[in-house]
Image (spheres, rainbow, N blue to C red):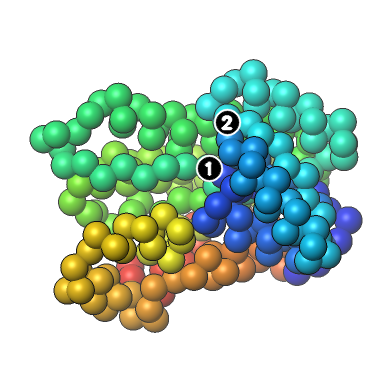
Amino acid sequence: MDYRGKVAMVTGASSGLGAGISRRLAALGAQVFLVARRADLLAELAADVGRNGGQAIAVSCDVTDEQAVRSLADAVKDRFGSLHLLVNNAGRPLSEPLQVLRLEKAREVLELNVLAMASVTKAVLGLLTPGAAVVNVASVAAFRGAPTMSLYAASKGAVVAMTRAWALELASRQIRVNAVAPGIVRTELFEQAFGRFSPAQIAALERSHPLGLGQVEDVAAAVAFLGSEDARWITGHTLVVDGGFSA
């Protein structure tokens, strides 16, 4: 998986999976556009990547803002002219039982997890050259029902569906589109939530993943594979990375 001379863009790059994916791609030689709303966190990540010998450019952008997304695409075009890999990672969770579901929160989740993903991909489409790839971050929630997670699961199910459709649409351009569907990964956000779980709940979560809970690096490695030449004959696929949870 050699990314030397290639340009990648990762949305939602400021923390969690996005930061881990960005570090992995930079370590493999890519020049990485780091995209998120938090400029301070992006700057810290870009500096960290640089200290480790990688190259990263931090660009603050709200991907739900259509004008900001167009400006983002222009920035990539002006700096590099083309893009080898787009990683659509920006998203947010939502856990609310149906009987108390706040529709305004549900709309925000669908806006970010689904529509913004389409907006970013559309904006950079002209920069994706033959042989380029798109990797969308879905979730195992798209395949397994879970109480209180209906709207989040619906948004990730939409990501899987868009991935298949875009793969067919873009095949004639020799652009591959795949997705990863992580199980429970020990991100900063999850570790914070862990503090609210009882020992029994934590044990149950760990038992539900036969290979144990995931690390950010596990998902980052899968994304790097799907974006690389090693996956050149794979498109329209969702790679489940969940330590056996869905099995």
The residue located at (54%, 70%) in the rendering is 218
Residue 133 can be seen, yes or no: no
Asked if residue 98 shows in the view, the reply is: yes
Q: Point out the residue furthest to the bottom here.
A: 211
Q: Position of residue 107 (x, y in %)?
A: 35, 27
Q: Amino acid at mark 1?
A: Ala
SS at circle 1: loop
Q: Place residue 244 in its image quadrant.
A: bottom left
Above or below, comparing residue 200 to residue 102 in the picture: below
Label 2: which secondary element: loop
| Residue 90 - label | 1
**Mark 1: few/some/many CA within 10 Å (<14, 14-19, 20+):** many
Left or right side of 174 for 11: left
Quarter holding the C terminus is bottom left
Work out how far the residue at label 1 is from the one at label 2, CA to CA, in angstroms. 8 Å
The residue lying toward the viewer, choosing from 59 and 178, is 59
Number of marks drawn: 2
Task: Estimate the x, y position of residue 221 in percent, counting from the top left.
Answer: 61, 68
What residue sits right under mark 2 in the picture? 63
Q: Please tell me which residue lies in front, 90 or 235.
A: 90
Q: Residue at x 23, y 64 (%)?
A: 197
The residue under the point 68% across, 64% down is 24
What x and y, as percent, mark residue 153?
32, 46
